[in-house]
Structures are given as structure tokens and as C-alpha cells.
């Protein structure tokens, strides 16, 4: 058999297996569910990074394959939509889903936390610091004006990210269920150029959650799941 033909046949046989391995199945809900074939988010990209290499090794950065596709695609779109801006994702879930302490959700691969984009005193886009001594960023508290030490919330970058997540999700046949972000800080989002789009298309939390969600925002995705 011709060598080229031989390797082509092998590749064709393996390709469906690769697709199967990369396709996730979610069960139940974000607060009571599980996940099969969860996939890990990339450690970093051109304009984003994960919040902790320790957490990554601990297996806390897995999502549904469809969610990964949406997230990576959105970051790619932000390279042109918001050049020079940097982003950081945080807690996601385990490879097989299930209880994900201390979170009440993140059970079936459809919940993702993102660290709030910030600017330094010079107006430069920088990553919010995440390390064990500040509970990987979750202990940070912004004031009512969106300030923390010499950092300020980059509402334009944050609004652009939610906008791009929704656009990418819809393009792939999925959607966003809700975004949880401190209600007292949401006004800043609606003052950006993305404000009208967000008001029309995104369901934001109306009341403060059991944790404030100021240093991070929680996004739940809509992907078909089995009961």
C-alpha cells in the first residue's frame, strides 16, 4: 500500500476518536450536575492567562468543550476588539464536574469565573494579582467607585468581554444564561459603548450574591445537557 495512502487512512480512523475525546457531555444543572469528558482551558493565550498554576495542577480549570470553544474564541475576538487589553480567567470546575467547594455552582462545566479587568494608575491594562495570600484574588475588595489600591476597574474591557462571550456563544449555537457581578458596580458597564447591547441581551444579577462578585464576575453558559 502506498505510504501516503496508508497514513491518510490512519489519520481518518483516528480523527473521529479525537473528536469524541474532545466532546463533553453535561448533566443536570450548574448547582446539581456533573460532566463527562471535561476539557482544560489553555494556561494562557495572546491576551489572557489563567489565575493560578497551582489551581491548574489541582484540576480546577476544566469546562465543557463547548464552553472552552466559546471562551477561546471570545479572547481571540478581543485581540481586535480591545487591542492592548489583558484578561484573566479564574475558577471553572473539575474534569468530571460535581461539587466544587467553596462554590455553590460550577457542577456541570457551564460556570466560569473571570477576574475583573483593571487598569493601573497610568491607565495601562494589567492583571489583577492572584496568589495564595489573597485567596487567588478572591479576597480583593473594590470600593463603590471601582477602586482597589492603585487599580481601577476597566469597565470598557469588562463590558467588551461579556459582549464578545455572548456574540461567540450565539455564533456557535449556544448562549449565556446569566452574569453575576456586584449590582452596585454594574452601572459602569452600561456607561460603555457596549451598554445598550448588554442591557438588551444579557441577564445580570439583580441582588448581591452570597459573595460579592466584585473582584470577579461569574458567567453561566447555556449548552444542552442531559437530565
Image: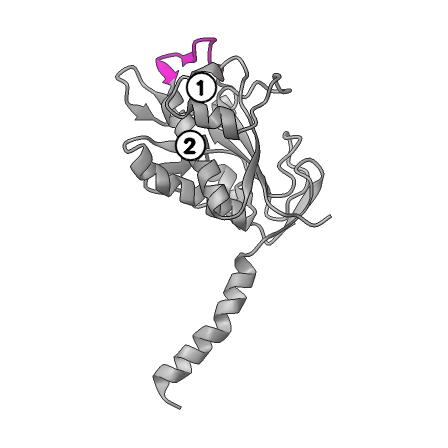
Residue at horizontal 39%, vertical 40%?
Answer: 75
Extreme-right residue of the structure: 227
**N-term mark: 1 or 2:** 2
Residue 203 position within the rendered picture, expressed as x and y whole percent measured from the top left: 57, 27
Residue 88 badge: none
Crowd band around label 2 with a 10 angstrom C-alpha radius: few (<14), some (14–19), many (20+)? many
Determine if residue 61 is in view. yes
Foreground disc of the pair 1, 2: 1
The answer for how far apart the CA atoms under marks 1 and 2 are is 13 Å
Residue that extends furthest to the top in the rendered view of this protein: 144
Q: Quadrant of residue 190?
A: top left
Instruction: Give SS at disc 2.
Output: helix
Where the N terminus falls, by quadrant?
bottom left
- Report the residue marked by disc 1: 190
Please say if 203 is above or below 70: above
Q: Which mark is residue 161?
A: 2
Q: Can you give x and y, in whole percent of width and height, for residue 133 in the image? A: 48, 23
Residue found at x 39% / y 37%: 49
Q: Is residue 109 left or right of residue 78?
A: right
Magenta span: predominant SS is loop
Foreground pick, 173 / 42: 173
Q: Is residue 145 magenta?
A: yes
Q: What is the image's colouring?
A: one colour
Please state the extent of the stretch shown in magenta in the rendering: 141-152
Disc 1 secondary structure class: helix
The x and y percentages for residue 185 are 49, 15
Q: How many marks?
A: 2
Residue 192 magenta-highlighted: no
What residue appears at the point 70 percent right and 50 percent down from the top-left corner? 226
- The answer to whether residue 155 is left or right of residue 225 is left
Look at the picture and state if 69 lies above or below 50. below
Image x and y of residue 101, in percent: 64, 32
Amino acid at each position: 500500500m502506498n505510504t501516503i495512502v496508508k497514513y491518510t487512512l490512519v489519520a481518518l480512523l483516528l480523527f473521529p476518536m479525537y473528536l469524541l475525546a474532545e466532546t463533553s457531555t453535561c448533566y443536570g444543572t450548574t448547582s446539581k450536575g456533573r460532566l463527562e469528558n471535561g476539557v482544560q482551558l489553555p494556561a494562557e493565550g495572546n491576551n489572557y492567562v489563567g489565575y493560578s498554576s497551582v489551581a491548574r495542577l489541582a484540576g480546577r480549570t476544566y469546562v465543557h468543550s463547548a464552553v472552552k470553544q466559546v471562551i477561546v474564541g471570545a479572547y481571540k475576538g478581543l485581540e481586535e476588539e480591545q487591542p492592548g487589553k489583558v484578561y484573566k480567567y479564574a475558577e471553572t470546575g473539575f474534569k468530571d464536574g460535581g461539587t466544587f467547594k467553596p462554590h455553590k455552582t460550577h457542577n456541570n462545566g457551564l460556570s466560569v469565573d473571570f477576574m475583573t479587568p483593571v487598569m493601573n494608575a497610568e491607565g495601562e491594562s494589567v492583571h489583577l494579582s492572584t496568589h495564595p495570600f489573597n485567596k487567588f484574588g478572591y479576597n480583593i475588595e473594590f470600593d463603590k467607585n471601582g477602586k482597589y489600591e492603585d487599580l481601577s476597574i476597566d469597565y470598557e474591557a469588562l463590558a467588551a468581554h461579556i459582549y464578545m462571550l455572548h456574540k461567540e456563544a450565539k455564533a456557535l449555537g449556544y448562549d449565556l444564561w446569566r452574569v453575576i457581578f456586584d449590582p452596585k458596580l454594574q452601572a459602569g458597564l452600561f456607561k460603555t459603548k457596549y451598554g445598550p447591547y448588554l442591557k438588551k441581551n444579557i441577564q445580570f444579577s439583580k441582588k448581591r450574591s452570597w459573595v460579592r462578585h466584585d473582584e470577579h464576575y461569574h458567567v453561566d453558559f447555556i449548552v444542552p445537557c442531559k437530565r
